[in-house]
Amino acid sequence: MNIGGVFTTSWKIFWRHKILWVIGITPPLFYAIVVLGTSFLDPDRLFSALNNSWPNFYGAILVVGIGVVFLAIYALASVLAATTIVRGTCLADQGIETFTFVDLFRGSRDNFWKVIGLYAIFGGAFLLVVGALWALAFLVVIASMGVGLLCLIPLFFLLLPVNMLGAAFLELAKAAVVADGLGIGAALKRAWGLFGQNFWNIVLVAVILDVGMYVFSFILILPLYALMFIPLWAQLGQDGMQVQDPASNMFSSMRWIYLIVMPFYMVIVGILQTFLRTTWAATYLRLVSASSPVQPLAPAVAEPG
């Protein structure tokens, strides 16, 4: 596989079809809006109002339930966005120059629940592995009075490459579902076969994408920390080393960070995720075309109505 060709193709698709940007931006921007809204709530006043109407237990359940609903909406929107971005990449790779939101969603709805199944499988596997490691660490700490925990540190560091390869495997399986209409089992089998035949190419693509994402994210998050301390620095400059109520100043400054910077940051995150998913979809298409011919994706834009 020509890795340079894959990145060139994915960049052309990514840059030409800005509609994919809008889709990728929507879930992170929704998350930012929810965080912004909740950051300006007064928790004491909110719980006081709830406790006047319901007992403490039911008030807490209501708040937690609202949070779970918002998280579920965000998760479903993220899955739908990921599915439609892969769909749009496949259509663009076939030479279809123009497609709309309706075209993308129409072609993605049949695969939506299968992609959710993939996320559930990989999420469950990740939680199982992490839970097993923490249980092992707990037993080792009890048995060795804490000394044996040092021997387990390399295992926790192994989670980084395992997580990277797991995410790459998930992206290939997701592309198999969307591009070729495979079921969950067949998509996992297809992705496993591609991994076995092109392991180092896939690792190289994953490293390039992950390192690039981390670098851009680190560069973007630095202004957040800098802005967070501006009020404290200003007060230090005025009052010397005596700072009145630093926690209150910190909380106030964080509100302004969320208001000014966080939506911008989430937009950038959505754009970067769009490029990442576009690249993995293009990688899948190149790997499959190099290994064995498959039926092309049926373009939704060709359907009447």
Image: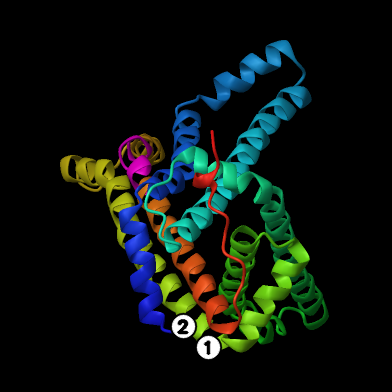
Q: Residue at x 57, y 24 (%)?
A: 44
Q: Residue at x 74, y 61 (%)?
A: 183
Q: Where does the image place residue 196, in percent across and percent down from the top left?
A: 65, 86
Is residue 54 depicted above or below 38 in this figure? Answer: above
Estimate how packed mark 2 is, as few (under 14), some (14 to 19) or many (20 or more) residues with alpha carbons within 10 Å.
few
Estimate how packed mark 1 is, as few (under 14), some (14 to 19) or many (20 or more) residues with alpha carbons within 10 Å.
few
Q: Which residue in the structure is indicated by mark 2?
A: 204
Q: Residue at x 59, y 64 (%)?
A: 175
Instruction: Indicate the quadrant where residue 177 lies.
Output: bottom right
Is residue 16 depicted above or below 200 in this figure? Answer: above
Q: Where does the image place residue 37, in percent across and percent down from the top left?
A: 47, 29
Would you say 214 lies left or right of 16 here? right
Contact, mark 1 vs mark 2 (Cβ under 8 Å) = yes
Residue segment shown in magenta: 256-266
Measured in 3D between alpha carbons, the distance from the residue under mark 1 to the one under mark 2, in whole angstroms, is 6 Å
Q: Where does the image place residue 184, in percent across and percent down from the top left?
A: 74, 62
Residue 264 on the magenta span: yes
Q: Which mark is residue 200?
A: 1
Type of amino acid at the residue the image marks with label 2: Leu
Q: Quadrant location of the C terminus?
A: top right
Q: Where does the image place residue 69, in percent across and percent down from the top left?
A: 66, 33
89 or 147: nearer the eye? 89
